[in-house]
């Protein structure tokens, strides 16, 4: 099975000036654990629920902290044609749970560990 079969094609995007509270609210409403941060200067990045939680744990103000200040810019991207094993391996090596899926120059989806598990469980159950 391929990343394109598991990924979500509805991507939450935020700007670098969104506050962490705004970002968290949008992630909560969409029920996603990560958002793509589009910044004209820095390019494409990702912010995750872990980034928000880390900031809160440090006592930072979610109404003053911005998504841009907590964005990971050294993003590992997946391609739609990757196997789920390739995606899971990249996540394991990098220690993260989300991959932005790129096709050409732009994001076309997001795949998470949960997406991969959803795909693997029915296939594994049917085989066993």
Image: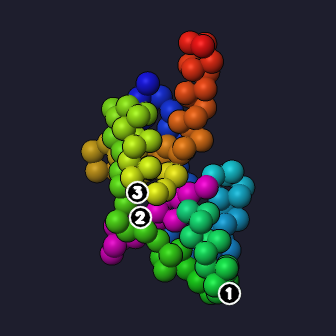
- Residue marked by disc 3: 94
Q: CA distance from mark 1 to mark 2?
A: 23 Å
In front of the other: 81 or 107 = 81
Query: How far across and down, in percent of the image, does residue 119 sit?
Result: 56, 28
Residue lying farthest left?
A: 104
- Residue in the image at 65% along x and 59% along y: 27
Residue count near mark 2 (Cα–Cα under 10 Å), binned few <14, some 14–19, many ≥20? many
Q: Earlier in the sequence, mark 3 or mark 1?
A: 1
Q: Please report the bounds of the magenta region as a residue range.
A: 33-47
Q: What is the secondary structure assignment of the residue under circle 2?
A: strand
Q: Judge depth for marks 2 and 3 and give the one in front.
A: 3
Q: CA distance from mark 3 to mark 1?
A: 26 Å
Query: Is 53 colored magenta in this rendering?
Result: no
- Residue in the image at 67% along x and 79% along y: 56
- Residue marked by disc 2: 45
Q: What is the secondary structure assignment of the residue under circle 3?
A: helix
């Amino acid at each position: 099975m391929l990343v394109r079969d598991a990924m979500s094609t509805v991507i939450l995007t935020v700007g670098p000036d969104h506050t962490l509270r705004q970002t968290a609210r949008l992630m909560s409403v969409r029920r996603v654990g990560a958002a793509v941060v589009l910044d004209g200067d820095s390019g494409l990045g990702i912010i995750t629920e872990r980034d928000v939680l880390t900031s809160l744990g440090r006592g930072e103000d979610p109404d003053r902290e911005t998504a841009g200040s907590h964005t990971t810019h050294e993003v590992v991207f997946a391609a739609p044609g990757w196997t789920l094993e390739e995606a899971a391996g990249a996540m394991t090596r990098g220690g993260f749970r989300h991959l932005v899926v790129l096709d050409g120059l732009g994001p076309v989806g997001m795949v998470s560990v949960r997406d991969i598990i959803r795909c693997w469980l029915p296939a594994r159950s049917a085989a066993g």
